[in-house]
Image (tube, grey):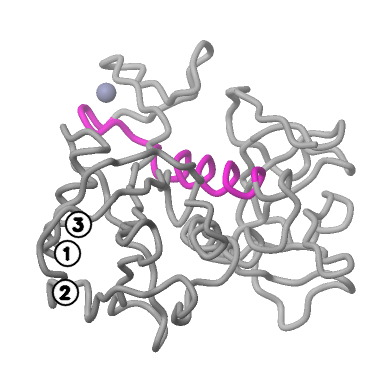
Amino acid sequence: MFTVSNVQSAFRSVRELEPEDRLVLLSRQETLVRPRGGVPELPTVREAVKLAGGPFVEIGHFEGGRCFAGRLSACPERFPEGMELWAGRAILAAGAEDTRTALCRGREMFLWRDQHRFCGGCRAELSPSRKDLAMLCPECGCMYFPQIAPAVIVAITRDGGREILLAHNRRFADGVYSLIAGFVEAGESAEQAVHREIREETHVEVDSIRYLTSQSWPFPNSLMLAFSAEYAGGEAFPDGEELADCRWFRRDALPLIPQPGSVARLVLDRFAAGEL
Ligand SMILES: [Zn+2]
């Protein structure tokens, strides 16, 4: 069981960690894991000490021990027995919930601390606040909190929920269609973002917006807010920039959809089961 820690501390070196502490060791989009029966687990300091470059930031507690996030020291040609580098998305798809939570927390906390070392106002070196989960400027008092970028992702249905509007984004693999998604702009509500994104990307209008679920998506720092909405008018055609295609699909004739692990897949599975 992973519990989030709001402990604020300076970065730590590997020598300050205990042998049974767990590590989220990051290498760009990948993380070091020890798969057991196909389920990725986080290694302990004892197991991964030679690969742990640091510095490390404390992110929580994992089955009694502390958990730290840091950078992989180097990428050897071969990892120690039982250790593998897994893409973050694969861990979200296959990992237990506590491993997934630790990964999301670890990626976002480490990148936040790594990228907030100096004050953007006065250039002084920042230090961790003793009271808040924030980096504090000792000169001008500016505080820098972890930053999360909210995004909306929407299942647009019609014909009594039997058809869904899906899109092929130019970044997707060939033939893969998914839900309409986009970032919430500054000053905008999530519902306003739903209307705007759908209008901009597919040219249709929706109503009856309903919140479904959410998911941390730390690539690098998103919070995905999933909604359903009902088609209310307009002819669907792609914006020609982000989207190469968009079209209606019936529940029993869905195209290729995203792999398990994403909130898009979770919502599409619910649609396929007639649960939206
Ligand atoms: Zn400052």
State whether residue 125 is above or below residue 215. Answer: above
Spatial CA distance of label 2 from label 3 is 10 Å
Look at 73% across and 57% down and name the residue there. Answer: 95
x then y, percent, for residue 203: 11, 63
x then y, percent, for residue 234: 10, 62
Residue at mark 3:
198
Spatial CA distance of label 1 from label 2 is 6 Å
| Total numbered labels | 3
Look at 87% across and 31% down and name the residue there. Answer: 64
268 falls in the magenta region: no
- Secondary structure of the residue carrying tag 2 is loop
Q: Is residue 160 left or right of residue 103?
A: left
Main secondary structure type of the part rendered in magenta: helix
Are the residues at dot 1 and dot 3 in contact (C-beta closer than 8 Å)?
A: yes
Q: In this view, does 257 lie to the left or right of 163?
A: right
| Residue type of the residue flagged with mark 2 | Pro
Look at 56% across and 71% down and name the residue there. Answer: 259
Instruction: Please report whichever mark, 1 or 2, sits nearer to the chain's N-terminal start.
Output: 1
Quadrant location of residue 33?
Answer: bottom right
x then y, percent, for residue 102: 67, 44
Are the residues at dot 1 and dot 2 in contact (C-beta closer than 8 Å)?
A: yes
Ligand 1 is found in the corner quadrant, namely: top left
Give the magenta-colored segment's residue range: 101-123
- Secondary structure of the residue carrying tag 1 is helix
Q: Which mark is residue 201?
A: 1
Look at 49% across and 16% down and name the residue there. Answer: 132
For the residue pair 178 and 135, the one nearer the viewer reads as: 178
Residue at mark 2:
238
